[in-house]
């Protein structure tokens, strides 16, 4: 996780998430952390419960479509479990994406959750190798 | 916005003539100051919408428009199935049938004033708000289907609402043509514990005072008098709508490709109205509308319980419930032809004028109430639909203030606690589970709602009736 980092970028009504990493999977995981940071300070979320999911890939090798699917799967796991996540591990294979998330149930006092994420969008969507060995994954979230 | 690309038609109307792949023009309703402030992306996105198959009339842009996904927020576009018209999940938005309703309470300022804080605390305990909140109601599979096809009618049948509310809701509280079988398991799962929850972001429940009346006669018909206390609720279809939006945005990528539609922006993904995906979305989206109508009805019920505790005599009557993220099948005269079209209104309110058969009898003479929500701490407005709105914008008007600053900028600029103290000094009590949420929704992060409604009024999209001032704001 040496070069992994994330940031937010501006979108008028909403907010963009951007992750960087040595591989697409690492960039995805960093962007997921940026997603949590839209809701709360990720350092306030204790990674004590584990949630796993698999995504069947139906993206014809398009990593951008896979990225939106991945973020939407996390949005779903946040919404139905009423949880926040602060640690992510992602493995991308030919046929599927495997994700492990660690987090805890929303504690409104401690997390002060700012806003619910409705979904990830195709706006400003990009997954690319910006320089040898550094991947970027980004899109705008609807909040 | 760069005005060099625009033709100014009059004080409040600007036109982008069709060029390139545009099939129809873009018409923007705004005064010069609003145009100057409007993002260039709005023009680009509206022009993109006009390239979609089967679009008729124009892409109409409301005075509060801002950069959205695919469609601008504040964009209206109608598609004719006979011309190969399409339906777009992005043209409705993630929060299907997000909308506003206002109720009169029969109370006056002096009734509310002594217990304002207690009332605010009672409301925030009674109505689940914010991230991680859940409702008391848990729907099993059978009830879920009943809710998705019954809307607010279902809520009333279950005891969450009053029979007489129904005629004061668009579609009489129940959107016909909903097909619950098109709503995925995941979408249902997201909704199971979310009925009667307000959500977060710009959603709110407000106690307001009628501060100013612009049109006495129409205000009388709506039941509004200067100094009256009203309650306004702004929210949508919650997790269910968001999940339907997410899933169909993806399905429509493929459907558009298969139909040979050249998309200028992925977010404009759409499907022909007569295609399997188009029909499936229509059924699911209409079920999403019912979910939003049921949700607002249940919140109303929870809010009424709080009021009846403090004011046993008060009778909270629904004035009207409008949605501003929809696609509706309507009949319009477009370029002299009567057409049955599917009108997408994304961040735009339907504004039928006098005589329209779809509005309740009681409003038939004057036109329908058009409720425009302000941002936290700022005024809201009630307008009325006009006869000329039909020709100008397919009977559509603005929906709110529209953001001026991003959430990130707002978060950096303001502190939630400070905003709450400042607003309290100005006479508005704000209660929210999240200080950061309050900072991101700071009044300064939004455009001037006054300018937006003035422009809508001057453009003839809808006429000003009353201005509402917030006294208590419950924020998600």
Image (cartoon, rainbow, N blue to C red):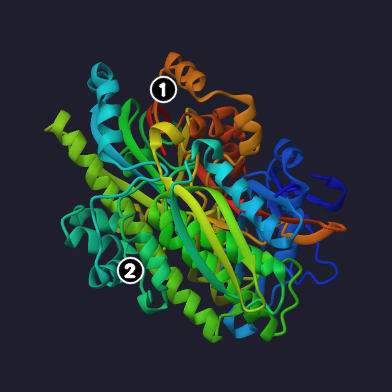
Q: Position of residue B305 (x, y in %)?
A: 18, 40
Residue B57 visible in the displayed image: no
Work out whether residue B275 or residue A20 is closer to the camera in this orientation and state it: A20
Does B206 sit left or right of B401 as displayed? left
Q: Where is residue B352 in the image (x, y as percent from the top left)?
A: 46, 57
Q: Mark 2 points at which residue?
A: B148
**Discs 2, 1 touching: Cβ within 8 Å:** no
Q: Where is residue B283 in the image (x, y as percent from the top left)?
A: 43, 76
Q: Disc 2 to disc 1, how far (Cα)? A: 36 Å
- The image quadrant where one finds the N terminus of chain B is top right
Residue pictured at 35% horizontal, 53% vertical: B363
Residue pictured at 39% horizontal, 36% vertical: A108
Chain label for disc 1? B
- Looking at the rendered structure, which numbered label has been put on residue B440? none
Q: What element carries label 2?
A: helix
Extreme left residue here? B312
Does B155 sit left or right of B129 as displayed? left
Q: Where is residue A18 in the image (x, y as percent from the top left)?
A: 70, 50
Q: What element carries label 1?
A: loop
Q: Name the residue under label 1.
A: B428
Q: Residues within 10 Å of mark 2 (few under 14, many from 20)?
A: many
Of the numbered discs 2 and 1, the one sitting upstream in the chain is: 2
Q: How crowded is mark 1: few (under 14 residues within 10 Å), some or many (20 or more)?
A: many
Q: For residue B83, what is the image quadrant?
A: bottom right
């Amino acid at each position: 996780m040496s070069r992994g980092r994330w940031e937010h970028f501006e979108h008028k009504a909403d907010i963009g998430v951007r992750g960087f990493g040595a591989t697409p999977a690492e960039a995805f995981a960093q962007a997921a952390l940026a997603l949590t940071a839209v809701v709360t300070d990720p350092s306030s979320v204790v990674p004590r419960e584990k949630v796993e999911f698999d995504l069947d890939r139906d993206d014809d090798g398009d990593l951008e479509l896979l990225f939106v699917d991945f973020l939407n799967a996390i949005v779903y796991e946040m919404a139905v479990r009423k949880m926040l996540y602060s640690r992510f591990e992602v493995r991308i294979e030919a046929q599927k994406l495997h994700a492990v998330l660690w987090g805890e149930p929303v504690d409104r006092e401690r997390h002060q959750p700012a806003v619910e994420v409705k979904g990830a969008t195709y706006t400003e969507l990009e997954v690319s190798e910006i320089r040898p060995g550094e991947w970027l994954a980004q899109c705008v979230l609807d909040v | 916005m760069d005005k060099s690309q625009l033709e100014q038609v009059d004080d409040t109307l600007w036109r982008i003539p069709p060029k390139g792949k545009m099939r129809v023009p873009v018409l923007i309703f705004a005064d010069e100051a609003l145009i100057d402030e409007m993002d260039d992306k709005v023009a680009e996105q509206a022009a993109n919408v006009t390239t979609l198959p089967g679009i008729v009339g124009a892409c109409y842009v409301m005075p509060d428009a801002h950069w959205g996904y695919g469609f601008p927020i504040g964009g209206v576009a109608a598609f004719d199935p006979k011309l190969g018209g399409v339906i777009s999940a992005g043209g409705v938005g993630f929060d299907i049938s997000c909308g506003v309703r206002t109720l009169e309470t029969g109370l006056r300022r002096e009734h509310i004033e002594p217990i304002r804080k207690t009332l605010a605390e009672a409301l925030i305990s009674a109505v689940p708000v914010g991230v991680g909140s859940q409702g008391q109601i848990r729907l099993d599979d059978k009830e879920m289907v009943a809710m998705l096809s019954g809307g607010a009618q279902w809520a009333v049948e279950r005891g969450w609402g009053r029979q007489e509310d129904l005629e004061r809701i668009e579609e009489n509280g129940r959107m016909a043509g909903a097909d619950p079988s098109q709503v995925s398991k995941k979408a249902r799962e997201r909704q199971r514990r979310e009925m009667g929850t307000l959500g977060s972001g710009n959603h709110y429940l407000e106690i307001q005072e009628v501060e100013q009346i612009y049109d006495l006669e129409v205000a009388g018909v709506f039941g509004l008098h200067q100094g009256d206390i009203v309650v306004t609720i702004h929210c949508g279809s919650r997790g269910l709508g968001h999940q339907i939006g997410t899933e169909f945005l993806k399905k429509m990528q493929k459907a558009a490709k298969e139909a040979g539609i050249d998309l200028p922006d992925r977010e404009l993904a759409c499907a022909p109205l007569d295609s399997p995906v188009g029909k499936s979305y229509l059924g699911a989206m209409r079920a999403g509308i019912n979910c939003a109508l049921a949700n607002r009805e249940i919140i109303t019920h929870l809010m009424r319980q709080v009021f009846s505790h403090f004011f046993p005599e008060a009778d909270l009557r629904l004035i009207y419930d409008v949605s501003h993220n929809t696609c509706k099948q309507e009949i319009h005269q477009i370029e002299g032809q009567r057409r049955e079209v599917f009108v997408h209104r994304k961040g735009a309110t339907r504004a039928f004028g006098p005589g329209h058969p779809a509005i309740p009898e009681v409003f038939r003479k004057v036109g329908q109430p058009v409720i425009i929500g302000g941002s936290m701490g700022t005024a809201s407005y009630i307008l009325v639909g006009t006869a000329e709105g039909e020709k100008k914008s397919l009977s559509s008007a603005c929906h709110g203030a529209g953001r001026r600053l991003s959430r990130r900028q707002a978060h950096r600029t303001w502190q939630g606690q400070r905003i709450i103290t400042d607003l309290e000094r100005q006479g508005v009590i704000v209660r929210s589970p999240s200080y950061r949420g309050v900072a991101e929704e700071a009044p300064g992060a939004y455009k001037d709602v006054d300018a937006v409604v003035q422009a809508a009024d001057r453009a003839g999209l809808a006429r000003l009736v009353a201005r509402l001032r917030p006294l208590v704001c419950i924020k998600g």
